Amino acid sequence: MTAIALSQSTRRLFTVFGLTFALLAAAGLVRPATAGNIWFEGGVFGSAAIRGYDVVAYFTQGKPVEGKSDYSHKWNNTSWRFASAAHRDLFAANPEKYAPQYGGWCAWAVSQGYTASIDPAAWRIVDGKLYLNYSKSVQSQWAQNIPGLISKGNTNWPGLKQKLAAK
């Protein structure tokens, strides 16, 4: 292996960049790219699906509720957190019932042919399925034509999922 000579200022720049990234990662503001599970990358924050929120709570309480690491369940190579053992057990018995559509990616973005992360507070249950959006403003755009955009999302998702798997 050949060593590359770097100037003092270039080495300092790399050090500053590395420390900055490490601090941002520790704060949960960025995370390194990994080959991880494509199904729930859109909402994975740290190591928990949909930023650690309890997916069962959307159905049972009608609102986003933060999960606790004490009540977690591993499914589809992803850790899911729940507010209670009862919610964890409901999910474990039927994860497909509670898991968000489009692998946890923003439903509006998938309808447009790309993927985007989500905000757990931007959600809606339609026909018994959980859909998440990037933000509340994006959710309001999605809400203008939910049936049409779900149809587009359902058409786009298989191709997007295949692209994500190829990365």
Image: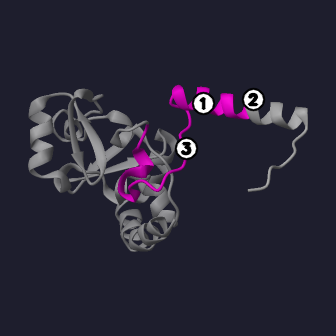
Determine whether 42 is above or below 52 in the image. Answer: below
Instruction: Give the alpha-carbon distance from disc 2 to disc 3, as whole Å.
Output: 17 Å
Quarter location, residue 37:
bottom left
x and y percentages locating residue 27 in the rendered image: 53, 25
Q: Which residues are magenta?
A: 17-45
Element type where label 3 sits in the image:
loop
Residue 75 screen position, x and y as percent: 23, 50
According to the image, label 1 marks what residue? 22
- Is 139 displayed left or right of 23 in the figure? left
Name which residue type carries label 3.
Pro
Answer above or below: position of 39 versus 27.
below
When asked about the image quadrant of residue 46, the answer is top left
Mark 2 vs mark 1: which is more N-terminal?
2
Residue 67 shown left or right of residue 90 in the figure = right
- Closer to us: 67 or 137: 67
The residue at which mark 2 appears reads as 16
Tell me which numbered mark, 2 or 3, is placed earlier along the sequence.
Answer: 2
Tags 2 and 3 touching, CB below 8 Å: no
Residue shown at 55% from the left, 32% from the top: 25
Q: CA distance from mark 2 to mark 1?
A: 10 Å
Give the labeled residue for mark 3: 32
**62 vs 75, nearest the viewer:** 75
Whether residue 167 is situated above or below residue 86 in the rendered picture: below
Q: Residue 30: horizontal and vertical position, in percent? A: 56, 37
